Image (spheres, grey):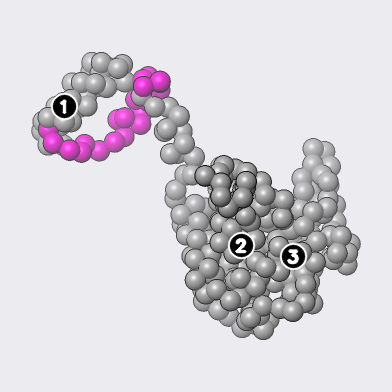
Amino acid sequence: MAKRGAGQQGTLGLGGGSDASSGSRAFDEFRDALATSTQLRNELEQALRANVHRVNPTDRANRFGSGGAVEWILASAAFAAGVLSVPGGHNANGFDLRALREDARGLWSVKNQTAPKAMAYRITNGLGGSGGGFTESTVFLSPHLPGIVFADPKVHTELAAQTYDSGDATMLGFAAIRAHAVAHPECVAICDMPVNPGTGSEDPWLAFIESLLNSQQYPTLARMFVASKPVQGNLASELQTLVALRDAGSLTAEQFDAAVQRLTRGG
């Protein structure tokens, strides 16, 4: 298999768009935009790589945050490609990004893998069953695929027929998706997906929790975050900040005294 960049993806001769249709006009436009715009493709690849390098999706707590980031990245690329339009029209004075994300979800579901080894895709989960099954258009991402692979179960019935019930989920084998990509190059948008290096250490929820537990509303719960911050600014401003935190109840008298001593000692 030919290799491109740091990934393990073959190009399958995908270089300049396709005259055939994937069955989705939106995906066709997205595929052609990635084939013709080096800038768009490079930014998409770099963003996907940065996401998996910063946040490790093998950590269960991070998995949904990392997956949500992939949805936003693809929505941004689709918007740049002209596939998604501004809600309310181009003359709208601003718009709700959440509405745009819902529009993106209406185009296709996103199934992303970054593991070093190719695996079957979990299409749907269920409570005590396999869920709704393969019923909606989906894009599959993996460093082991030749690009972003599109499939519509209503159009690509031969692929949909290869799903199976694992007991608690509807699954689709990786080999079936790979074979679909080879047989249908019109369903492949060229993109080099990253392998998870397993070194990401950021917690995507930390900034949200810190903003939630702000010292104005939660002076007691915010103490942990306040205490974790390094000393910054000049002495007078730092002392004023400490006094304000003490007066707001974010610092106890003992914590205030200790912070002042640490500050006046220069650390």
For disc 3, the marked residue is 25
Q: Residue at x 56, y 46 (%)?
A: 92
Residue 115's x, y, as percent? 60, 61
Q: Secondary structure at mark 3?
A: helix
Of the numbered discs 3 and 1, the one sitting upstream in the chain is 3
Residue 111's x, y, as percent? 68, 56
User: Height in image: 111 above or below 37?
Assistant: above
User: Height in image: 1 above or below 222?
Assistant: below
- Out of 202 and 188, give the one closest to the viewer: 188
For disc 1, the marked residue is 239
Of the numbered discs 2 and 3, the one sitting upstream in the chain is 3
Residue 159 falls in image quadrant: bottom right
- In-image side of 249 versus 242 (left or right): right
For disc 2, the marked residue is 82
Q: Is residue 223 magenta?
A: yes
Task: Please report the bounds of the magenta region as a residue range.
Answer: 216-235
Between the residue at mark 2 and the residue at mark 3, the CA separation in whole angstroms equals: 12 Å
